[in-house]
């Protein structure tokens, strides 16, 4: 009887009407992007960007080029494969064979352009680290920030993912920022645009939406949301995708813990937004905004 | 001298008066539930529920039944073992031998009833995915939601854990929802009752307490708490366990980021609760509730 | 051409002007502390502190001393190595050889003193568990709290890290509390001072800053921040490190979800701080403080 | 100076004149066959051929088809990949692109034909096991032979490899028989032709050359060589490949330990060849051949 | 079409008539002994028997008892499980349930008696090591022999397996000696009886049959066979199992490389048997026996 | 009672009189050489020596120097550590501290000199491969020999080990050749001296003793022994270590399967030694030597 139950359940779960909404049909044998390999790619990138801090090797100026050379080569190889999976995830071939050849030939060039961006990515991260150090009395050294700080971990994943987003790679950028979300509780959409010298302290609960635009020298604390307030629906009642709907935060703004900023509004340059405040309209430059007063008994 | 220090510390840590509050005495050799095996079970269930999205295999309609068959068989075997551990965790045998035979014979039937629920669980999750897709302009496809969205990850673990909770399995449901809590920052107690078409966006910081009741078509955002306000104490000053103390959220409610809703109150159908609000009394149906006004300088 | 692009990128990434801010130069071949080994140390400590709950072994009173003996010996060996890495991370030798001999000889004594503290750490954790049990109607047993509760997980890492912090070990304490931050979303700086019977419920988003002082019998909920309000800058405009800048929370205080408490203020004994409140001034003893009123439509 | 030595050695090892004889140039990115994956394939085949003996699963008649189905599907997938690597190992494309498309399209059909042969391979192995059982007073059961006997291990690998050899797959058959050689000391070339009811006892040191032909019901002991005596050279003095040069052993022959049989000679049916003998000419049917006499002091 | 071929093959392989000779039906869910766990047991035993040589720990006289205590406890736990599998492998229950309860209750006592034999096993191995050292001019130290010599590796597995053989455990002893056979090419049946101060040099190809009896101070070289010459058949033509059919080798005998000694004959004390000789009759004590003369051109 | 048995056995095994002959006392915390790391070193060396054949990377002329650079750097790091362990294995410090500093400072220079020898080792192996190809009609390509042939595998380990032997590193050379012995059944002592163009076919059972001297262009088959006949004892009856006692085999000699050649004798150039022969006296150059005649019935 036990076997009958199992067999019957297996049969039900194998019916197309049961699985068709939740089943990934690979195209020409291309599977889903592979989470473990994506993790390997991001680990290799962390080793490349911050040599000596990550990875087991005792890298030195003398052998630097060998290590960077191998790590870049491996990233290129693994990433090209995963980009194929990402492109095929989205492709709807009329003639299946043609299009996936297309995905394969695209992937190699995309990977190459991504790799070319790494020196720039490293330079931006160095600025982010400096900004974090200057803004946190508890930090003892650049090294502690690189190795331990969740803010830098999340920003690193974001800056990597954003480059792939700009190259129109489907799915992979989101996987990379979700890895950081899992680790740090910081949820930055890879589509967001973020300037230089960006710092996040503590970070758990931060949400930065897809169409957010953040200037230079911005600092935010844990629990800050840059979200959408509402979004227009199309004639069928479904949300219209891709419309700017998240805040613009100009240069030199500081946003304290748990502040919620919603909609396509602008927080003007040099403003300071206090903790726990809730904002749905523009804030002009140089404003200091906080809870009107403390709650009392 | 160094050895003496180590030996003396070992001796102290091995004294019953040191360990007796924090030591798990296995009954008849049955150890604690095994975290790694619980992870394996949940991974297998994810592969069963969302074929092709998780696991390494290139599953297709032609070989679907083989793969589902093996995965279900493995879940049954592993879960039966872990249910024994879970039952023994709680059992207080007068005659130790008798009762644990009891745990062993119970476990197999419970596992079977759990497996029978899987087609229903998958159907509910398909609805949750659809609700998430319809509510998020940033989502590109069902597949992206299944693979990357922390909300669906947490709801999947909850729906699995809730079935085991209904079957009165101790500890395992909590382990399963805590796995999702660790990954996503979303903390849903397995005892909560949640209807269909449930969606959580971003999700970090969400807390849904043990006796919460959530209707159909409810959507919540990051940082939302459905918590207890206070709880009655028994004559010894200890909290009385098991009393309904969390909110009831009726159909079609939306609750925005960081809202805190406490106590056995009811949020009436079709209401919209704004971000950061704090509620400890009933809200009637069709209410739109938000912060009275924005804070100003 | 592809190879030229890769080679050119590798060359750029290997230039000192590209890597010098983000490169860890190991001293005398001592690498960074090793994350995997730090995880192994913390796992072993969890097995020592809570025998039978963690690890694969079927530990019993009869073989307890063998298991504790081996685990303590392994912690001592691994930790001594990692302390060397931690000390060297910070050392700036005039004569490199001399000072790192110094790091090596220091490490062994520090590890020993840390191990001597374990019986005390276990006793404090037993109290924390009891406090958690008494404060949560959903908890079924001490065992469930030890095994599943993120609050206890984070407090365990904190209490371990704090002992190393008191022994002036660089970096390792922070790595240990960040591990818990990643797992639980609870961010406790190892420098904070926390009394007995401490309980955190749910916990995601909790931040407890470096110079916080928490008394006995304090309970806090998810999203609570004990943070700095502002901090003095030195003549160069950099924050002055190490100044007390976080709250003092006296005995028997309860702080509900999402409350934000900033600056070197004192929350007097026996006070109750409501959810979502925002506090930047002292609160006298025995105060009940909450949102002035609920938001309405 | 140390760095100079390493760099100079690296430079020398990277010169084409140093590596050109010992370097594998992959064609169109197809690497060498992968040893670990070949091991996985052979492990899966052992699970398929001897269900319940190998692998971790508790296979039963009820779930047999699920398990066999998944294992066969995985073998097909892994083997197709490795056959591509094997074919490319040997291909010398004029136009590289065309030919490797050829390798890819070939591989799938070859894998399929190999899989079709599995029922026959299992049936032959069942006969080999029976022959081993009947010939060894120390064997307690079929199961012991399947699980522990090196002879059956080596014959299994040979029968698998021989099917791939007949399908003209390069390199993979040799890898598979060398795996058994490493484990058992039994070296059977995949090109050898071996009839039914074949048994090898103990087996260490057995060598069966490429063009050997072995009839039905043959039994051999450890250290037996079926080798080539000499081989003709071509006009350049190189050995001519592929000429029959190893013995023909007819039905029902027994060959005892350490016997050496060399050249394209025939050992007639029903003969018994004694231990340590050395034979380079035909032996007629029904002969008993042994050392003329024992050595004495 | 491809899918049809796979499905048809799967169907054939799942027919009882295909698998019934080569399928292991587990009894009451007890699977085959687990090869990986058997390896773990033997590794632990090697760590116990030769402390400091095997395993990663830095064992010292001060912590010796902790390490030995844990290792013995783990062996006991793992071995008890595997003995159950071994006993069930052989049991033919009338009433299945009764007998396997029997296997379970037997296993624990057997494991305990095995563990009691470990001090004796270690003492015998120490003598074997001394004998090896004294007999090999190439050996530099006891340590080199313990760590590197295949002879000691094989003898260790034999001495362990022989204790289990004496306790009538099915299958496991054979698995343990086959592990050594795989590693070293030395094939000692666990049923053989071997005295003290036994040494094997090089060892590849050595075969020592089930009913062999070897005295004290015996040394043998690579390729030596102590085998059966022929064996009586029962009325059905099957070999009669368990009859003494291998040589008796008395004290102080040396047997050089590749010698083959067959049948229940006795090699008298203090004899020296030369390389490559072939013996099927008794050799009286104090005999020096070698090839009559060298071969010439 | 069970616990008493275990405890008593643990106590006995922890007594110095039980373990003192079989216990490795590490010096200043330096443990035994680590088998797993030795395997890693040999794997890396195989990748360096035969690029593209071993390892997972898709190495090409363009990225060759990066890969070789990293592999050489890792070998240097790992090998230096293991050489320290090897040197300490043998050192008998009067003043323990001084001498082990000595071992540490020695190790780095030895590793460097070993690495300098790699181009020469690769060149010799290329010649050995060519000799194997020319001598085996079954071999299809150099690649097949590099990847699959046990003879080349064993010779590679020997040539690596021999370089370390010449640098007076204790124990490690033996570990390396025993790895090959385990895999291939070919036992070459690292102290043997072997010329260029050396080939071993099949190889199982080959033994080449410590003081053997082999010229150029020598080929040997499976089961060949180059051993010691007897060895002088010192006044205490122990064998005198290090005296030449194995054969000298001059250029261009072929030795067929299972031949046994014993003692410090010379096999003159261009000789051919037949299978199974047994030789203990010199053989002059250009001799063809085989079994006098075949055995007959």
Image (cartoon, coloured by chain):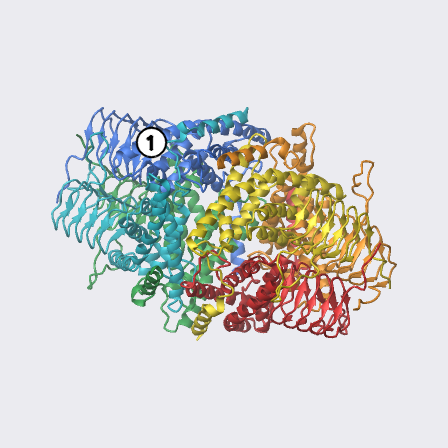
Chain colours: A yellow, B red, C orange, D cyan, E green, F blue
Quadrant (top left/top right/bottom left/bottom right) for the C terminus of chain F: top left
- What element does badge 1 sit on? helix
Q: Mark 1 Cα within 10 Å, few/some/many (few <14, many 20+)?
A: many
Q: Residue at x 87, y 60 (%)?
A: C285
The residue beneath circle 1 is: F128
Q: Position of residue E119 (x, y in %)?
A: 47, 50
Horizontal placement of D232 versus F264: left or right? left
Q: Position of residue F188 (x, y in %)?
A: 36, 34
Quadrant assignment, res C202:
bottom right
| As drawn, B67 above or below F225 | below
Horizontal placement of D259 versus B237: left or right? left
A208 and B1: which is toward the camera: A208
Quadrant assignment, res D237:
top left
F51 and E193: which is toward the camera: F51
Q: Chain of mark 1?
A: F
Q: Position of residue E193 (x, y in %)?
A: 34, 51
Q: Is residue A84 visible?
A: yes
Horizontal placement of A76 versus E2: left or right? right
Count up the numbered dots: 1
Horizontal placement of F182 versus A229: left or right? left
Q: Position of residue E287 (x, y in %)?
A: 24, 39
Q: Is residue D141 visible?
A: no
D171 and D223: which is toward the camera: D171
E48 and A15: which is toward the camera: A15
């Amino acid at each position: 009887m036990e076997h009958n139950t199992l067999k019957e359940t297996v049969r039900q779960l194998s019916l197309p009407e049961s699985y068709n909404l939740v089943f990934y049909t690979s195209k020409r044998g291309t599977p889903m992007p592979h989470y473990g390999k994506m993790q390997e790619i991001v680990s290799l990138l962390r080793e490349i960007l911050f040599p000596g801090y990550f990875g087991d090797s005792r890298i030195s100026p003398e052998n630097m080029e060998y290590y960077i050379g191998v790590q870049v080569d491996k990233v290129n190889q693994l990433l090209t494969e995963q980009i194929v999976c990402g492109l095929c995830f989205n492709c709807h071939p009329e003639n299946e064979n043609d299009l996936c050849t297309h995905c394969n030939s695209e992937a190699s060039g995309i990977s190459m352009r991504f790799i070319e961006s790494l020196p720039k990515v490293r330079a931006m991260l160095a600025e982010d680290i400096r900004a974090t150090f200057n803004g946190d009395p508890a930090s003892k050294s650049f090294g502690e920030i690189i190795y331990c700080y969740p803010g830098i971990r999340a920003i690193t994943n974001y800056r990597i993912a954003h480059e792939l987003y700009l190259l129109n790679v489907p799915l992979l950028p989101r996987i990379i920022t979700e890895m950081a979300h899992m680790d740090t509780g910081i949820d930055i959409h890879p589509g967001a645009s973020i300037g230089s010298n960006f710092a996040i302290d503590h970070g758990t609960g931060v949400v930065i939406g897809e169409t957010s635009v953040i200037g230079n020298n911005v600092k935010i604390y844990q629990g800050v949301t840059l979200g959408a307030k509402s979004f227009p629906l199309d004639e069928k009642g479904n949300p219209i995708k891709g419309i700017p709907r998240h805040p613009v935060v100009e240069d030199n703004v500081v946003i304290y813990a748990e502040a919620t900023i919603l909609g396509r509004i602008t927080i003007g340059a040099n403003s300071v937004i206090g903790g726990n405040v809730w904002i749905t309209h523009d804030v002009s430059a140089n404003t200091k905004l906080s809870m009107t007063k403390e709650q009392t008994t």
